[in-house]
Image (cartoon, helix red, strand yellow):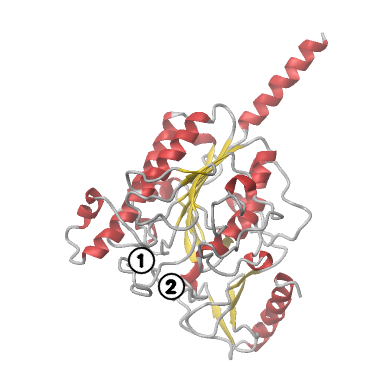
Amino acid sequence: MCRIVACFWLLALTSIVSAKPNIVVLLTDDLGYGDLGCFGHPRIKTPHLDQLAHDGLTLTSCYAGAPVCSPSRAALFTGRNPNRMGIRDWIPQGSSVFLPRTEVTITQRLQAAGYTTCLAGKWHLNSKFDGMEPTPGDFGFDHWFATQNNAAPTHANPTNFVRNRRRVGPLNGNSSTLIMDEGLKFLESAGDRPFALFLTFHAPHEIVAAPDQFTSMYADVPDVTKRVYCGSVSLVDQEVGRLLKALDDRKLRDNTLVFFTSDNGPETLHRYPTATHSHGSAGPLRGMKLSMYEGGYRVPGILQWPGHTTPGSTSDEPVAFYDLMPTLCAVAGVEPPADRPLDGANVLPLLDGRSITRRVPLYWQYDKAQQGPWKLTLRQGEWKLLADEKLETVALYNLVADPGEKSDLADKHPDRVRELKELMTKRHHEVNGK
C-alpha cells in the first residue's frame, strides 16, 4: 500500500514539474529600437518577429540593463544593477573582468525549480574561456555553446565557439544559424522536463555578415554595407521563425513563454574602424549605443505567452532587464534570491492590465556614456532625470509626451527635479556601496 501511495505522489510531482511553462529568451546584439518592421522600420523585413508581436504583447518601453553589452547582460541574468558587481563597461578579452561567482543567476534559480537550461550564443560575462574564470556552466547552464565576446573573425564561419569548456571551431555557417541549430538540438534532448533556453545572437553587432540570400532581399539598396546589415537582421528573424516552428511541431508553443529583445541600442556608423555596416536605427528616440538618452538602452521588446498575453496588445509601462529575475522566478514558481538586493520587479501584473509595483525606481549608471555629460539616469513613471557623475548638472524629460527627449523641462519643474534627484542620489549611493 505504501508503495502505491509513493508512486501516486511521484506521478503527481512529475505532472506538476512538466506543467511548468518553458522559457525562451532571445537576445540580439546592438539591434536598434527601430530595426524591426513591428517597431516601424520602413525597409527591413522581419515577418516572424512581426507575427510574434501580433500574437503577443509589444513592450514599447523596454529597457536594457545598460547602453553597452556586458553590463546589460549582467543585469539580465542577475536582476541587479551591474555596477553592484563591478561590471561597468564591456569586458575586453583577457582583462580578468568577469561576473563574480557569488552572483546568483536566473538560470540557477530555474534549475532549482526543475528546469533544464541552455545558453547558445554570446556570453561576454568573462574575459576568457580557459578555465580560470567562471563560464556559463558555473551560473546554471546545463549545456552551453558560446563565445567570450563576438563571433570571430566575423559572423560567417566563426572559429571561436566553445561548447561546455571545449573549443569547437572552426565552424561552417553564419553564427545566427549555428546558434539556432544548437538551441534546436537542445530542445530535442530536453524530453519532458521544462526547459529554459537563452539564445544570444551576435547579430547585428560588427563584424556583421549575412548570406547572399538575405543581402539579395535588399538589392534595391545602393549601399552594400547597408544590405549586409539589413540582411543580418532578416537572418535573425528567419532563425526565430525556425524556433517558433519547432515549438509548434512539438506542440510546445502553448506552454512556452518567449521574450525577444536587444542588449542595447544601435551602434554608430564608423565609430571605430570595423563599424562599417552599422546602419541600425533608434527610430524616434534620441541617442545610440553608449548614450544615456533613450536610444542607448531603450530596445525592442516582445513577449508572447499563450493564454497569458493578449494577442496584438501593447504596453508602454517601463519594463527593464532587471525585471527578468523576479518575473521568471514567479513564472517558474520559485523564489528569487533573498540574501541580496534586487533592482527589478515582477512584471506579470501587466498581463492582467495592472500596473507594476516597484520597490525602487529604475536606475542606470554608465560611467563612460557618450553624448553630453550624462552618466546617470532615473525613470519614475512618465518622468526621466539625467545627471552627470557628480549629480550636479541635470535634465528632465517627460517621456510620455516627449519620447524623443527634445524638451528639457528641468527649469519648468524644479520640484520634480528635486524629488527625482533625491531618489537618484539614494540609488546612486546604494548601487555603488556608499
Q: Position of residue 375 (x, y in %)?
A: 57, 79
Q: Amino acid at mark 1?
A: Gly
Return the mark for residue 288.
Answer: 2
- Find out whether the residues at labels 2 and 1 contact each other: C-beta distance under 8 Å: yes
Q: Give the structural element (helix, strand or loop) at label 1.
A: loop
**Label 2 vs label 1: CA separation?**
9 Å
Q: Quadrant of residue 388?
A: bottom right
- Left or right: 301 as drawn, with respect to 274: right
Q: Which residue does the image show at 38% across and 48% down from the upper left?
A: 176
Q: In the displayed image of the protein, which residue is found farthest to the top?
A: 1
Q: Give the structural element (helix, strand or loop) at label 2.
A: loop
Q: Amino acid at mark 2?
A: Met
| Front residue of 126 and 122 | 126
Quadrant of the frame with the C terminus = bottom right
State whether residue 23 appears in this view: no
Q: In the rendered structure, which disc, 2 or 1, sits on the residue that comes first in sequence? A: 1
Q: Which residue does the image show at 70% across and 70% down from the upper left?
A: 431
Q: Position of residue 244 (x, y in %)?
A: 42, 39
Return the mark for residue 280.
Answer: 1
- Left or right: 115 as drawn, with respect to 198: right
Q: Position of residue 415 (x, y in %)?
A: 68, 86
Q: Which residue does the image show at 58% across and 72% down from the upper left?
A: 382
Q: Residues within 10 Å of mark 1 (few under 14, many from 20)?
A: many
| Front residue of 54 and 423 | 423
- Left or right: 293 as drawn, with respect to 48: right
